[in-house]
Amino acid sequence: MPLLKERDKRLLKARFSRDLANRVRLIVFTQEFECEYCREVRELMEELAELDERIRVEVYDFRANRKLAERLRVDKIPALLLFGEREYGVRFFGIPSGYEFTTLIEDII
């Protein structure tokens, strides 16, 4: 079941089309077991990526990719990192919902 409503998808697609200047990588660290909201964060980022071809999602298992997690300073999950043309240090831990979702969209743009 989608996390975003159809109306919200249409609004976000239009916003990305109008305002998104560069490609964006949404890097998600998760794991399959013992992680509250890991699945939801991954699914939400995948839904956002479907709205604009300039948004790409990369999903990494926190345990299997420990060295990458350490290099990117990820020490808890679920973790979401945003990379534009370079890393800007934008990170979300947990699910970005409510006011954090608005911040996430602004950070993507």
Image (tube, rainbow, N blue to C red):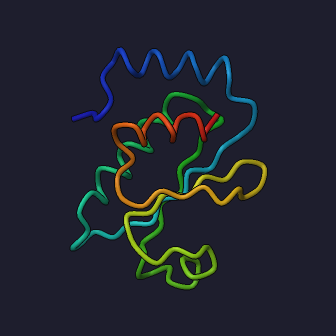
User: In front: 5, or 54?
Assistant: 5
Q: Is residue 77 above or below residue 22?
A: below
Residue 8 position by quadrant: top left
What residue is rendered at 68% in x and 28% in y?
20
Quarter of the image that includes the N terminus: top left
Left or right: residue 16 versus residue 99 is: right
Q: Is residue 100 above or below residue 102?
A: below
x, y percentage for residue 83? Answer: 67, 53
Q: Is residue 87 above or below residue 43?
A: below
How many numbered marks does the figure carry?
Answer: 0
Residue 86 position by quadrant: bottom right
x, y percentage for residue 67? Answer: 57, 85
Kindly give the residue lying farthest to the right in the view shown.
85
x, y percentage for residue 30? Answer: 38, 66
What residue is rendered at 53% in x and 57% in y?
58
x, y percentage for residue 94? Answer: 36, 58
Quarter of the image that includes the C terminus: top right
What residue is rendered at 61% in x and 33% in y?
53
What residue is rendered at 49% in x and 22% in y?
12
